[in-house]
Image: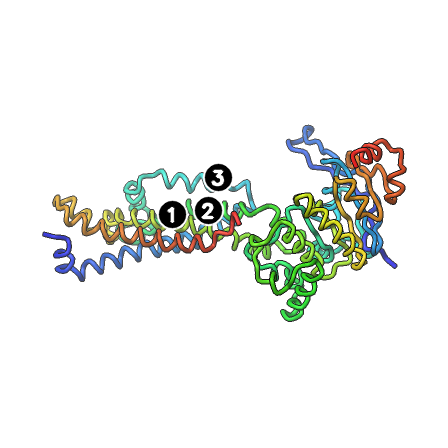
Amino acid sequence: MTKPLEVAGLGYDLPGRGKGERRKTRPLVRDVSFTVAAGETLVLLGRSGSGKTTTLKLINRLLEPTSGEVRLGGERAADLPVTRVRRRIGYVIQDVGLFPHFTVERNVGLVPQLEGWPPARIAARVRELLALVGLDPDTFMKRYPHELSGGQRQRVGVARALAADPPLLLLDEPFGALDPITRVELQREFAALKGRLGKGMVFVTHDVREGLLLGTHIGLMLQGSLAFLGTPDEFRRSDHPECRAFMAAA
Amino acid sequence: MSLLAFYSRNSQEVLGLVGQHLYLVAISTGAAIVVGVPLGILLTRRPTWRGPVLGVANVFQTVPSLALFGFLIPLPFIGGIGATTAIVALVLYALLPIVRNTYEGVAGVDPAVREAGRGMGMTDWQLLTQVEFPLGFGVILAGVRVATVVSIGTATIAAAIGAGGLGVYIFRGVAVVDDTLILAGALPAALMALAADGLLGVAERRFAWRGK
């Protein structure tokens, strides 16, 4: 069976400013390779600026890789229309990015609407998803994002990412901006939810506890490269200095 | 002679001038919207054009309006004595606030919202029409409001080049040193500006999504 995500030799150089000789490029991601099977969650762990978020954006082509390739369900992402790539991938970001002028219903139903689903099917799907992320559909469907708490907004963000039932989910510090209590609450619920979903996920965080709780695999990024890739148990036992530094912070 | 007596005696003429004035403002602001809003959106897609385009629009603002009307008179096609010249000048004045606010409104959309939209597979056109334009609409309206209010005032000067409007009374009043006559032109123009400001202000607040 083909995997939701295969990444091989992925690299990204930031184009430099200036002209001619002075135009130097700076590598942000170097030779990153991993695969994510259905039901697996790869946690990309690393310090700020280690290339975690850049790697995510290379997968859904918000950035175009300088080298290497991304395969989605066996197909080369570079060969597909960019909007198709993105609609096949659920995307959750720390700032949520809900559309403030859309109700919760329209926010969650966005990708199905872009894909031209009939309205009745969208409405049913939205109800199903809100219930899935622990929000009562009748209470929340007609509300606007500014009428929600931070935790509720991120629940809506997760529901929106799941809307068109994508085989792959990318999450960029989704719980990073929440207060500690809400964060732990959502982490627990998410841990339970992801088992039921059976999707491939890439989850970016700098919080090692969150990573060990949610990941089936941990990828540790250091200066743009994957310094370690293994299970949480292997991560705990690793004697790589960066792994130890993270374990010491846990 | 009191203002009310003047109005009752000249009601036909007053209504005619008010109509002319509204015509000048509506046509020029309308044309400035048709040109300015797409231009402002274009600038968000071609950021390097922003400086030169806003610079040129800015230059028109600095030319005194009476001088601009004067400069336009000798030009072929758009110039001459009458309403066309006045409308061209009013459009040039109205462009800057509309272009600038359209740019600010569209470019000022929360980057997280834009990234989420792109990340979910919206095309640039979908992002513009469903997200950026609706979210920037309040700011764009603010530009239209400023342009309209300025146009109502500036259009009084259009009488100097034979375009008609309420400026006819003002110029006539200045010429014969008659305060009532000046007021007869200035008061309706001021009320018109206040009404436009109020109405567009209400519409603007209705679409103020930012900060929520």
Q: Which mark is residue B52?
A: 3
- Under mark 1, the amino acid is Val
- Under mark 2, the amino acid is Asn
Callout 1: chain? B
Upstream in the sequence, badge 3 or badge 1? 3
What whole-number distance in Å separates the C-alpha atoms at marks 2 and 1?
Answer: 10 Å
Per the image, label 1 sits on a secondary structure element best described as helix
Same subunit, tags 3 and 1 = yes
Vertical comparison of A49 with A3: above or below: above
Number of marks in picture = 3
What whole-number distance in Å separates the C-alpha atoms at marks 3 and 1?
Answer: 22 Å
Q: Mark 3 or mark 2, which is nearer to you?
A: 2
Callout 2: chain? B
Per the image, label 2 sits on a secondary structure element best described as helix
Please name whichever residue, A238 or B15, is drawn nearer the observer in this view of the structure.
A238
Per the image, label 3 sits on a secondary structure element best described as helix
Q: Residue at x 53, y 45 (%)?
A: B108
Q: Residue furthest left?
A: B1
Tag 1 residue:
B146
Q: Which mark is residue B101?
A: 2
Q: Mark 3 or mark 1, which is nearer to you?
A: 1
Q: Residue furthest top?
A: A22
Upstream in the sequence, badge 3 or badge 2? 3
Callout 3: chain? B
